[in-house]
Amino acid sequence: MKILVINAGSSSLKYQLIDMETEAVLAKGTCERIGIPGGKLTHKAKGQEFVIEKEMPDHTGAISLVLKELVDGEAGVISSMDEIDAVGHRVVASGEAFNKTTLVSDEVMKTMDEIAELAPLHNPAAILGINACRAVMPDKKMALVFDTSFHATMPDYAHLYAIDYDDYKQYKVRKYGAHGTSHKFVAGAAAQYLGKQPEELNIITCHLGNGSSISAVKGGKCIDTSMGFTPLAGVPMGTRSGDIDVAAIEFLCVKKGMTMEEGVAYLNKKCGMLGISGVSSDFRDLAKARDEGNDRARLALDMFTYACKKYVGSYAAALGGVDCIVFTAGVGENTPFIREGVVSGLEFMGVKLDKEKNNFRNDGTIHDISAADSRVKVLVIPTNEELVIARETAALV
Ligand code: ADP
């Protein structure tokens, strides 16, 4: 079985064609500048990279170009579109409308339109991608894989905000979380690596990238996560503030003459590592600046590791003990000093890092960075959201 995984943005579209027998990626690529002059498709297949410069007026144009590349010429990996058994689409937010991977239908797409406002930056783009695929491949089975699904198992006392309950019921304002597909993948991969069943393990998964979230996974199910109604909550991130007293926002809005909408945009785009350091949102730039003596870069990094450590500690309490801590994503996979900063001081709960092992060079494989006598395993696991989407799609169709 071959599954085409689609991750559509407003002007970009990423794809992977995965052979489910071997779980090998047959081809992958990115369409850039959809609907903007200067369209470009970068297609990787057969160990080579092909760059196709062609205008893509809309997502339908982009999908058509991708299919042509998958089938045609020297870059082609299948003989016809018939070889694609199904398509899996990444969708960021499902609200309470869907709590698991769902087959596309007219009715489902109607609901998708209704919940688009839950992730205004992401869901409308996913809808464009899905509709484009339906137009170009009308007979293909398609699945929607939601980032929020993995968090649907959070108990009510963990996912609710202490607001008027009637408002929660009417407006569905609650914690939904994000990065669920990644948390799910690394939690599953950790259990497999440790030779255990997911049911036997309490795992804390740290997806640390430009956006970061931390989840508590008990017996393979998410019981809590750091992101909230939107991805603004939790630890401070590249440009997002993370958790903050809402009254401070009102105060800032008044002082700076911002509307509420502008205030939220400020918290999403101008705060976090960028806001504190005044240097960059990128952890590599921050590390360099800190090493050159920039104290605000040092402060931003210290705030980040401190916030992550607090989440790890509180999730250890929520889980009733922890067997394994996993680091993943851009920062989690590539930044030894962040991993060390997050787990240092957690020796009291059985976490002991092997500093030498922690200094490995990322080679895309799983690394155990805990000391031999650490009660809690500390693992670094490269995330693979596309593979989860492909597996879920294959299972459903
Ligand atoms: P996103 O949330 O956009 O998916 P990523 O998971 O790609 O983000 O993480 C981006 C962050 O990861 C950046 O701050 C960057 O500094 C860091 N990062 C990514 N790749 C590397 C690398 N090879 N070495 C060090 N840091 C990296």
Image (tube, helix red, strand yellow):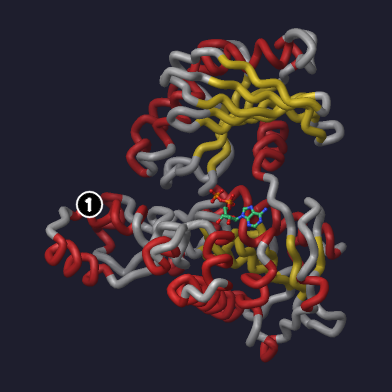
For the view shown, which residue lies furthest in the front direction? 292
- State the residue at coordinates (55%, 72%): 292
Q: Position of residue 80 (x, y in %)?
A: 75, 8
Task: Please give the name of the residue rendered at 72% of the width and 31% of the height, measured from the top-left corner.
Answer: 394
Picture quarter containing residue 266? Answer: bottom left
Left or right: where 191 falls relative to 106? right
Q: Camera-side residue: 210 or 170?
A: 210
Q: Which residue is mark 1?
A: 262
Give the residue at x 63% y 87%: 345
**Quadrant where the N terminus lies?**
top right
Instruction: Tell me the residue at 80%/65% (across/down).
Output: 360
Classify 10 Å Cα crowding around label 1: few (below 14), some (14-19), many (20 and above): few
**Most foreground residue, 8 or 166:** 8
Amino acid marked by disc 1: Glu
Please state the horizontal and vertical placement of residue 188, each as a whole percent of the image: 74, 55
Q: Is residue 196 left or right of residue 81?
A: right
Q: Is residue 169 visible?
A: yes
Image position of 289 (left or right of 198): left
Residue 198 sits above or below residue 40 on the image: below
| Image: 77 above or below 4 | above
Q: Position of residue 92 (x, y in %)?
A: 49, 42
